[in-house]
Amino acid sequence: MKTLLADWFSSVMTLVAAILFVASIPAHGQSRLPAPAKIQPAVDGIFAAFSAHSLVGLGDRHGLTQIIEFYEAIIRDPRFARDVRNVVVEFGGAAHQDVIDRYVNGDLVPYQELRGVWTDTVGWVPAVEHLGYAHFFAQVRETNHVLPPDKRIRVLLGEPPIDWNGIHTRGEWLKVVETRDRYAASVMEGVLARKEKALVIYGGGDF
């Protein structure tokens, strides 16, 4: 008897499940699947984000050529100079902010002076070695070449200033390393205080 009842109950539940399944099928073949996601070029997605946010961050995969080319594509887009204008980067030491300012504005800067921008960095050991970052600075310079001075793109160097001549021990270096996050935050706070916008390029772990 228990076996018959169990079989009967199983049959009834199977029938109910089948009815519910059929009832859930949309009439006339109409699909209830969600609408497909809108696909757009990645650069457009960045500028869409800027329509709602003053700071937009990109996690840098250090030294990957394709991602540096993507940064350059953003810089070349006329919307960047028009709507954003600032880019905060991890791959430059703030002790040389005046150097990068002159360089991206078209001044002649000797290479020995310019290279300090990416070699005098705190968190990159031993230093920024990827040539793509130097090429990025050159792209900003080239883009600025055709822009009026008050519309040019500015690169803000996010690594805290360091004087390597005064660093003799690991402990002295670590004291400066500990200021990295605070210094980067202060650069971004400056952008916000000026009611401006900035693209922020930092390693994914830093975010």
Image (spheres, rainbow, N blue to C red):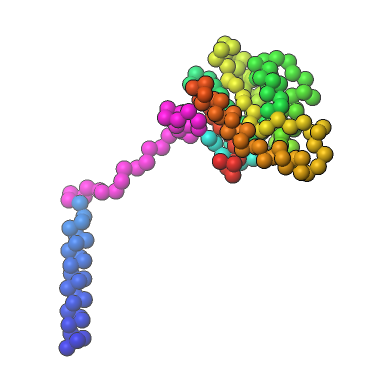
Q: What's drawn in magenta, residue-wise?
A: 27-56
Where in the figure is residue 7, as x and y percent of width and height?
20, 80
Q: Quadrant of the N terminus?
A: bottom left
Q: Quadrant of the C terminus?
A: top right
Where in the figure is residue 101, as x and y percent of width and height?
66, 19
Q: Dividing the picture into quarters, in which one does residue 174 lie?
A: top right
What residue is at 31 percent from the left and 46 percent from the top?
A: 34
What residue is at 58 percent from the left and 33 percent from the top?
A: 185
45 in relation to 193, above or below: below
Q: Dividing the picture into quarters, in which one does residue 112 lie?
A: top right
What residue is at 21 percent from the left and 86 percent from the top?
A: 3
Q: Nearer the viewer, residue 6 or 184?
A: 184
Q: Is residue 36 magenta?
A: yes
Q: Is residue 12 visible?
A: yes
Where in the figure is residue 67, as x and y percent of width and height?
59, 36
89 in relation to 7, above or below: above
Q: Is residue 135 visible?
A: no
Which residue of the protein is positioned furthest toward the top in this rendering? Answer: 148
What residue is at 18 percent from the left and 49 percent from the top?
A: 28
Q: Is residue 145 magenta?
A: no
Where in the figure is residue 55, as x and y percent of width and height?
50, 30
Q: Nearer the viewer, residue 28 or 33?
A: 33
